[in-house]
Amino acid sequence: MSFNHSDIRLQFPILKKGTYLDSAATAQKPQVVIDSMKHFYETENANVHRGMHMLSEKATTAFEEARTSVQKFINAKSAEEIIFTSGSTEGINLVAKTWGKENLGEEDSVLITLLEHHSNITPWIQLKDENDCAVEWVELDQNENIDITQLDKHLANGNVKLVAITGQSNVTGVRTPLKEIINKTHEAGALALVDAAQLSAHHPIDVQDLECDFLVLSGHKLYGPTGIGVLYGKRELLESMPPFLTGGGMIKEVKRDHFTCAAIPTKFEAGTPPIAQAVGLRTAIDWLLQFNWEDIEAHERSLIEKSFSELRKIEGLTILGPSDPKNISGCLSFVIDGIHPHDLTDIIGQKGVFMRAGHHCAQPLHEHYGIPASTRLSIGIYNNGEDIEKITPAIQEAIKIFS
Amino acid sequence: MDLYAENILDHFKSPRNRGEIKDPTVEHEELNLSCGDKITIQLAIENDVIKESQWKGSGCAISIGAMSILSEELEGKSVEEASALSIDDVKKLLGVPISQRRLKCAMLCLHTLKNALHSFKHEDTQSWTETIGQEEMKNE
Ligand SMILES: Cc1ncc(COP(=O)(O)O)c(C=O)c1O
């Protein structure tokens, strides 16, 4: 479908409430996504894989069709490689607490980077505490991307078992060279996990082309509902891993003193899954894929470049990360001399410009920049140039209050 | 009235009682985890009366302004009186409406004070929920 921007915008009724520049935290949902969940509850709701009745069959079909949609969206080889989770956080924890727990020992290490979100840090620190393995860090280079020389050095040590890396920073908007990193990781005999929570709404993902071993994403950042996410894993890996949560749904057979697991993906989906959310996610993916990625990326690139040049004109304002906006995607963060990000973000929020203040779940990165917090501007497909033009006047108001 | 009232901004720009006591009777630090604000209060207490209060820390205008304003109230108060200070008292001191999203900023000073006093009395520290919990729900 053609990329008619004013038409896209009309499909998000909530945008009337203000200038929403916080899509990296969670994206707004097009009306069709909201409607599809309502429709599901009104006409198809039942538990999946259980009841011997028509509604259960409908719900099961809808749920499994959602899995197939996700499979196509990230080009996985098979639908069984798609595990529904509650979000990226659960996906990473699942890998750490199953595969990680079984495969990492005292000699081994997990390699992460300074660009990671806490959800791709703390599960590995927990694993370190439990299994006595190491967690090692790759710092940034002068382009504010991850330092490949350091990555090489760590990989050359021979003890790295997993490289867990974000595809796109949720603070500076830097995209990591995933293919190169994954190649190097595999050459060193390690596995690669990609945190695509931020990347997935802004850039096409092809797990077969990337050859990543695991990948996680969150439905709510992809114009879908909260409460659902995806863990992709290569079939052999998922099959070899112990279950994560256990209980209903994920078993083959339960005896008084033991149980056996169902095949993947069910093995990793204990309990009643987020069914309506899966339906919503599927609708969100179908909705997004009606557009060309080239159009989406060109539109979003123009918004980031406009934001960058607008912000750069403001005295005392420092943008974290790359000095070239071409190296920024989806979001950027900044600080202003003498104004705490909390105050700034609150004041511009009162002017109707909604951004996020804080460390954005990336404390190590903020520490690296020597600041406790920043203000983050992030965009979605529905933002336009007028949104960006509202930023400077709102910030000027805040500066006036503090001058 | 605006949250960034002149009074608060004045205290933010020139904070009162920001400093250190040489031999404090008690010292306590608290954080506002959601934004990284951090405040340490020091108290000199004699015969159950606060003789001096000093504080240090970093944060937004609301948390720093509120701490500065509260610090002016403490000298001469008995431990009992200071322990009895409530959210409403701090709100009155600030004199502006505090939105739910800024409540923790505004009450970081009170939370830190309460726990400094608990520590002085060898009591368990109180949680954020105890400091502002009910209030937060009321605002929701
Ligand atoms: C890069 C990145 N990874 C992981 C997450 C966690 O996603 P969720 O909260 O949906 O589990 C986020 C969300 O903020 C993120 O930005």
Image (cartoon, coloured by chain):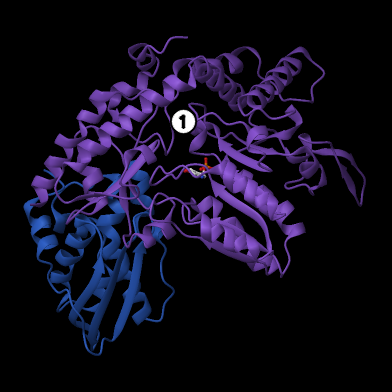
Chain colours: A purple, B blue
Q: Position of residue A240 (x, y in %)?
A: 82, 46
Does residue A399 sit above or below B74 in this rendering?
A: above
The answer to which quarter of the image holds residue A194 is: top right
Q: Is residue A66 left or right of residue A280?
A: right
Depth check: give the residue in front, A31 or B53.
Answer: A31
* Residue located beneath label 1 in the image: A202
Q: Position of residue A371 (x, y in %)?
A: 31, 60
Q: Is residue A162 left or right of residue B14?
A: right
Q: Is residue A308 left or right of residue A198?
A: left
Is the N terminus of chain B in the top left, top right, bottom left or bottom right quadrant?
Answer: top left
Depth check: give the residue in front, A188 or A395.
Answer: A188
Three-letter amino acid code at the position of disc 1? His
Does residue A381 sit above or below B48 in this rendering?
A: above
Q: Position of residue A341 (x, y in %)?
A: 26, 51
Does residue A329 sit above or below A320 in this rendering?
A: above
- Mark 1 falls within which chain? A
Residue A289 shows up from this direction: yes
The answer to which quarter of the image holds residue A69 is: top right
Q: Mark 1: few, some, or many residues within 10 Å (few <14, many ≥20)?
A: many
How many numbered marks, from 0 up? 1
Question: Which residue is depicted at the point 28% across and 59% down?
Answer: B107
Q: Position of residue A172 (x, y in %)?
A: 38, 46
Question: Which residue is depicted at the point 12% across and 47% down?
Answer: A399
Question: Which residue is depicted at the point 63% across and 31% down?
Answer: A274
Depth check: give the residue in front, A106 or A62.
Answer: A106
Q: Is residue A51 left or right of residue B125?
A: right
Q: For mark 1, give the secondary structure.
A: loop
Question: Which residue is depicted at the point 77% across and 58% down?
Answer: A102
Residue A125 shows up from this direction: no
The answer to which quarter of the image holds residue A90 is: top right
Is the C terminus of chain B in the top left, top right, bottom left or bottom right quadrant?
Answer: top left
